[in-house]
Amino acid sequence: MPARVSPTERIRGEIDALFAEDRDLSEVLEDVARLGARLILQTAVEAEVTEFLGRDRYARGDRARPGHRNGYSNVTVKTTAAGGQDAGGGVPTVSGVLAVATEGADMTADASRGLRA
């Protein structure tokens, strides 16, 4: 069974691998910038889910609210550059939550659609 690696860690690994390649530095830096943007988005989304659930990945014990992580959904981020870009790991999905109000917005989640407003 393969080890479970978060999308954040996978993107960091891709960045590390770029510097190990024998390519022109300007090409490597361009790819690092692209992956860095994906890493920032992925980290922010994962932090949002952690705050929403009140616990880290694989954390057990007391729960701040019902619900649990249920994998990731692939998403495409629309950019002003050429079309859209694959966001990498995707949006974490959350299951077991019927409805929650945060900062005036109703948030609902299910396994097929992920966390949404």
Image (cartoon, grey):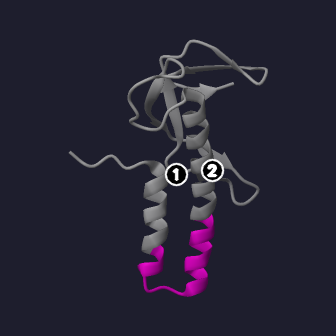
Residue 77 appears at what percent x and percent y? 65, 47
Q: Which residue is mark 2?
A: 41
For the residues bearing labels 2 and 1, Cβ distance under 8 angstroms: yes
Of marks 2 and 1, which one's residue comes earlier in the chain?
Answer: 2
Label 2 vs label 1, nearer the camera: 2
Residue 26 in which image quadrant: bottom right
**Which stretch is magenta?**
18-34
2, above or below 104, in the image: below
- x 48%, y 17%: residue: 96
Magenta highlight on residue 20: yes
For badge 1, the amino acid type reads Gly
What is the crowding at mark 1: few (fewer than 14 residues within 10 Å), some, or many (at least 20)?
many
Residue 14 appears at what percent x and percent y? 45, 65
Residue 88: which numbered mark, if any?
Answer: 1
Let me know if residue 111 appears in the view.
no
Q: Could you tell me which secondary element the residue under label 2 belongs to?
A: helix
- x 37%, y 50%: residue: 5
Q: Quadrant of the N terminus?
A: top left
Residue 51 in which image quadrant: top right
| Front one among 47 and 6 | 47
Query: Main structural element of the magenta stretch: helix, strand or loop?
Result: helix
Q: Could you tell me which secondary element the residue under label 1 belongs to?
A: loop
What is the crowding at mark 2: few (fewer than 14 residues within 10 Å), some, or many (at least 20)?
some
Let me know if residue 8 appears in the view.
yes
| Front one among 76 and 52 | 52
83 with respect to 73 (left or right): right
For badge 2, the amino acid type reads Leu
